[in-house]
Amino acid sequence: MLAVVCDDFKPSACLLAQIIEEEGFETLCVSDGWHVIQILQNWIVDLLVIDILMPDLDGLETIRRIREMRLKTKVVAVSGGSAEYLAAARMMGASMTFSKPVSTRALREFATKLNTAAGGDPGGRVSEVPR
């Protein structure tokens, strides 16, 4: 199973990717919504964890575009901003939302359920997509 983690703050993206990898996903880390869209046009992505507040193409606009593409990718939105951003992400179709700092336990549980439902096995790896 493939997960993409999108956050313009690299340490945060790396931490979230590591958590998801431990639950059996192969992960790609990117720093903006444009990279997410490019990946989704070429690969089947099972899970997207995306920060909402980012320069260029932000998380909400990225989620909107993903829904227009009619993909089945599960979206987890995260934000250090106000609760209104997370509420907007849920209204746009995010499966789960988290305030920063993200609860590693809750993210791990969500990733485990998704991977188990798809019949996945533990043992993913992290890759960083160059900018």
Image (cartoon, rainbow, N blue to C red):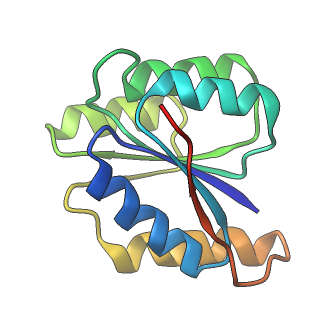
Q: Is residue 71 left or right of residue 82?
A: right
Which residue is most to the front? 130
Residue 27 versus residue 87: which sits nearer the camera?
Answer: 27
Residue 122 location (% of width, % of height): 70, 84
Residue 47 location (% of width, % of height): 63, 52
Residue 20 versus residue 96: which sits nearer the camera?
Answer: 20
Residue 51 location (% of width, % of height): 35, 40
Residue 86 in the image: above or below residue 124 = above
Residue at coordinates 51% horizontally, 78% vertically from top-left?
109
Residue 52 location (% of width, % of height): 32, 34
Which of the 4 image quadrants contains residue 110?
A: bottom right
Which residue is most to the right? 119
Residue at coordinates 56% horizontally, 81% vertically from top-left?
22
Q: Is residue 94 left or right of residue 7?
A: right
Residue 75 versus residue 2: which sits nearer the camera?
Answer: 2
Q: How many marks?
A: 0
Q: Is residue 50 left or right of residue 26?
A: left
Quarter of the image containing the N terminus? Answer: bottom right
Residue at coordinates 80% horizontally, 39% vertically from top-left?
43
Q: Is residue 128 left or right of residue 11?
A: right
Residue 37 in the image: above or below residue 43 = above
Residue at coordinates 26% horizontally, 32% vertically from top-left?
85
